[in-house]
Amino acid sequence: MSDALLTGDRLFPLLFALGFILFPLVFAGLIPNRATQESDRLKVRGKLTALVLATALALVIWGGLAFAGTRHPWAATAANFSWLMFFPLWFGFAMPMLGAKNPAWAITMHGSAESSGTVRTASLVNRERQNPVVRWMWVAAAIACAAGPIAIALRGLELFPMDPASGAASISESPEHLAWLVLLLVSMTAPLNLLWLPRVLRAILMEAEPMDVAGSSELSELYARQRRRRVLGMFWLTGIAVPASLGAIFALVVWFPNLGSMWGLIGGLGGALLGCFGAAFGFMMTAERAKIAEVRGQLNAAL
């Protein structure tokens, strides 16, 4: 590897991304397996295998981008943002495994028949109509997702310089053209957010909210406030901040390739900040849900 890769401004974002990728596997592996039935233990082993394989794939992607980043600034930038793989690893693999290893986690988050009392209550309010994400926000999300690909695509209207040292036989084989093509293809996945994000927000809105036996308004208000924060936080983070920042960095890389190391540093630090915010937000929402479960238990105990 080149000495430039070993400088602090390049090493920190890479190590930050590596830590985020490994965190779901390490955290889920350290939680004791409290499943008592053999079928449940087999289920835990299956989920652990899936998490290990998914983490290995993420590490291969991270390592490949980090290695390619020693020669190509666009790959270094992509490696710095590989921390985004934390989210599918955590929500898609680690959390289901945690629920299988320790049923108390699921009870804390979603309640149980015992904690909710023998009488189950439910609100008849259509929560889909209480979605805090209004129309102008979706317009902003569409702009955030489309701005990056459009800015990168416009670079293709201009000629790419030929570097004799690269050994390229034509402009289409030049490093800058290849970097432009790769970043264009990657950035074009951002509008896919507009397809899956509404489903994610709807799932949050319709998530089970166990009530106390009396169906107290206090508990309903706690659920409503926490639900609103979760929906808005998920929307602004994954629908606006992530696609806008990725699109901006990728566009700067293709338009000003001579400053690739600086864009890599800015992208790495920006990605680190987004990652820290996302992780803090997720843990805060989990803590709030656990607090609501505690309040529900206290309300039932007071009856």
Image: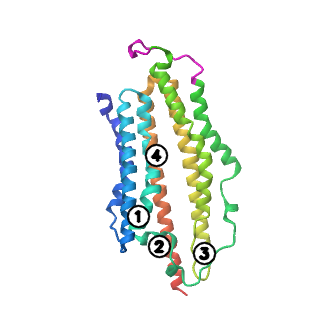
Tell me, what colour scheme is on the image? rainbow
The three-letter code of the residue at mark 3 reads: Glu
Does the residue at mark 3 contact the one at mark 2 (Cβ under 8 Å)? no
Total tally of numbered discs in the picture: 4
Structural crowding at the residue carrying mark 4, measured as other residues with C-alpha within 10 Å and reported as few (<14), some (14–19) or many (≥20): some
Q: Which mark is residue 107?
A: 2
The three-letter code of the residue at mark 2 reads: Ile
Dividing the picture into quadrants, the one containing residue 17 is top left
**Residue ID for mark 1:** 98
Among numbered discs 2 and 1, the one appearing first in the sequence: 1
Frontmost residue, 129 versus 43? 43
Does the residue at mark 4 contact the one at mark 3 (Cβ under 8 Å)? no
Structural crowding at the residue carrying mark 2, measured as other residues with C-alpha within 10 Å and reported as few (<14), some (14–19) or many (≥20): some
Which SS class for mark 2?
Answer: helix
Tell whether 56 sits left or right of 190. left
Residues under labels 4 and 3: Cα distance? 36 Å
The three-letter code of the residue at mark 4 reads: Leu
Residues under labels 2 and 1: Cα distance? 12 Å
Residues under labels 4 and 1: Cα distance? 20 Å
**Residue ID for mark 3:** 218
- For the record, the magenta segment spans 155-168
Residues under labels 4 and 2: Cα distance? 28 Å
Which SS class for mark 4?
Answer: helix
Structural crowding at the residue carrying mark 1, measured as other residues with C-alpha within 10 Å and reported as few (<14), some (14–19) or many (≥20): many
Among numbered discs 4 and 3, the one appearing first in the sequence: 4
Which SS class for mark 1?
Answer: helix
**Residue ID for mark 4:** 84
